[in-house]
């Protein structure tokens, strides 16, 4: 894992909201509402969390042009970060 990925890993890991949101996107594409329901994070916080994950290059929006029903997934870097987070829990 290179330094850039380690910095992003630390950024995601220090926030329980970012960490939980990233983990729920593992191998899946979800709407913000589904992410909120799966993580227990209130919907009004999910937008900020997803924006932070996008800016860090951990997640991406599949249909950015949509105003409703946006779909989010992990980037390849995000997938690597989530794998590391999960392995640390075991």
Image (spheres, grey):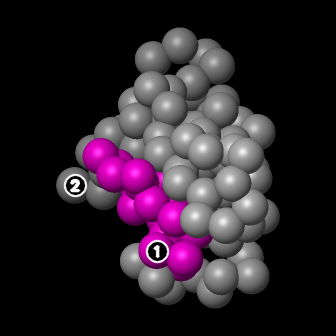
Of pointers 1 and 2, the one earlier in the residue sequence: 1
Q: Is residue 20 magenta?
A: yes
Q: Is residue 19 left or right of residue 88?
A: right
**Is 56 located above or below residue 51 in the figure?**
above
Tell me the residue at 53%/54% (across/down): 71
Q: Considering the numbered disc 1 on the image, is that residue within a helix, a strand or a loop? A: helix
Viewer-closest of 74 and 64:
64
What quarter of the picture does the N terminus occupy? top left
* Residue 34 image label: 1
Q: Is residue 37 left or right of residue 12?
A: left
Q: Is residue 15 magenta?
A: no
Instruction: Judge whether residue 62 can be spotted in this image.
Output: yes
In percent of width and height, residue 54 lies at 69, 42
In percent of width and height, residue 65 lies at 73, 46
**Is 4 located above or below residue 22 in the figure?**
above
Tell me the residue at 74%/82% (across/down): 44
* Residue 8 image label: none
Tell me the residue at 56%/42% (across/down): 62
- 10 Å neighbourhood of mark 2: few (<14), some, or many (≥20)? few
In percent of width and height, residue 45 lies at 73, 76
Find the magenta span and give its range.
Answer: 18-36
- 10 Å neighbourhood of mark 1: few (<14), some, or many (≥20)? some
Q: Residue furthest left?
A: 90
| Real-space Cα separation, disc 1 to disc 2, in angstroms | 26 Å
* Quarter assignment of residue 90: bottom left
Tell me the residue at 57%/27% (across/down): 6
**Is 79 located above or below residue 11 in the figure?**
above
Q: Considering the numbered disc 2 on the image, is that residue within a helix, a strand or a loop? A: loop
Instruction: Judge whether residue 13 can be spotted in this image.
Output: no
* Quarter assignment of residue 70: bottom right
In percent of width and height, residue 34 lies at 46, 74
Residue indicated by mark 2: 90
């Amino acid at each position: 894992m290179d330094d850039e990925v380690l910095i992003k890993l630390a950024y995601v890991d220090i926030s329980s909201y970012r960490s939980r949101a990233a983990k729920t996107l593992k191998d899946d594409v979800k709407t913000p509402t589904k992410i909120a329901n799966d993580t227990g994070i209130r919907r009004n916080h999910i937008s900020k969390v997803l924006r932070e994950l996008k800016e860090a290059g951990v997640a991406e929006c599949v249909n950015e042009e949509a105003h409703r029903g946006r779909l989010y997934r992990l980037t390849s870097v995000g997938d690597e970060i989530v794998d590391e987070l999960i392995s640390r829990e075991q």
